[in-house]
Image (cartoon, grey):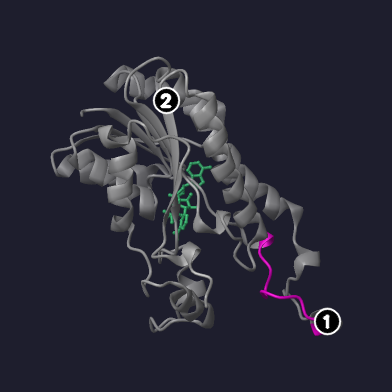
Amino acid sequence: MNKVIVLTGAGGVLCSTLAIALAEQGHKIAVLDLRKAAADNVANEIKAYGGTALGIMANVLEKDSLEAAKKIINDTYGKIDILVNGAGGNHPLGTTSNPFLETEDLLNKTEGFKTFFDLDPKGIEFTFNLNFLGTLIPTQVFATDMVGRDDCSVLNISSMNAFTPLTKIPAYSGAKAAVSNFTQWLAVHFSKVGIRVNSLAPGFFLTDQNRTLLTHADGSLTQRGQQIIDQTPMQRYGNPEDLIGPTLWLCGEGAKFVTGVVVPIDGGFSAYSGV
Ligand code: NAD
């Protein structure tokens, strides 16, 4: 082992868990995030347990910022072996208020109520850029180190809404479908130079990003939160730790003939028709 692994968005909930788990395997970890303090916190936690990590501020949408991060990583640890593209998220301007359009929604419109017709292209653009370009650009920068070397790979983070879109979030669903599609495209494109490319498709994980959508202040489930549990055969939300096993597998020796796959980690959500 002892690989050099870069994770973007690693100050966040899911990828901080992955960064710590990969550090526990003895890898050298570069924790990248737009929020420098969040990146530093995760790197410090890894170091406190005797691991090796650097916290670095980097914007996945700015090549210069990623090139500067790469120089620090190369100078400190050498060439990069593995990239986890974890930065991503949704934007409220790309989200409708209700799952279905009703005629009355257009007749009795209240302030702030958003139908499909009110979606702001700026919200759609933000979401597509962050999830799709925010996966493509870091791969352009960091995967140059991997060409022609053994045991190198890229792990993207898609979502189970890439298989079937979730109501209310057309931009995020479409952007994650683009990430899954890109995972397959890049796996084929990189197949001759020894870089494997795969993707995790997490289901519902209760995080700060979606907590108010899925739970009330007292912790009980909202209607949408209950609907998700009813549609999940395993009857629970995911824990960030549920992503560790699939990540170690896809980034490790055991997956050396695996490339171009999108692995759902969703308690059966995407397999269940509801009947
Ligand atoms: P999170 O919001 O906790 O973490 C995302 C991190 O990305 C944050 O620390 C944020 O600062 C960082 N970030 C945002 N914009 C950035 C930019 N331009 N450059 C660099 N960093 C940036 O979210 P999370 O729940 O940990 O999600 C991680 C990934 O998993 C995302 O791609 C998300 O879309 C995906 N995902 C999450 C869930 C879920 O239920 N939480 C489900 C499916 C997929």
Q: Is residue 40 left or right of residue 95?
A: left
Neighbour class for label 2 at 10 Å: few (<14), some, many (≥20)?
A: many
* Figure quadrant of the N terminus: top left
Q: Position of residue 211 (x, y in %)?
A: 45, 70
Residue 17 in view, yes or no: no
Neighbour class for label 1 at 10 Å: few (<14), some, many (≥20)?
A: few
Q: Nearer the viewer, residue 214 or 60?
A: 214
Residue visible at 66% across and 74% down? 99
Q: Position of residue 145 (x, y in %)?
A: 41, 18
Q: Is residue 167 above or below residue 33?
A: below
Q: Is residue 103 left or right of residue 182?
A: right
Q: Quadrant of residue 247?
A: top left
Q: Residue furthest front?
A: 275
Label of residue 195 in the image? 2
Q: Position of residue 205 (x, y in %)?
A: 41, 63
Q: Main secondary structure of the magenta part?
A: loop
User: Which residue matches tag 1?
Assistant: 103
Q: Which residues are magenta?
A: 93-104
Residue 136 in view, yes or no: yes
- Look at the numbered disc 1 and give the secondary structure of its residue: helix
Q: Nearer the viewer, residue 28 or 275?
A: 275
Kind of residue at disc 1? Thr
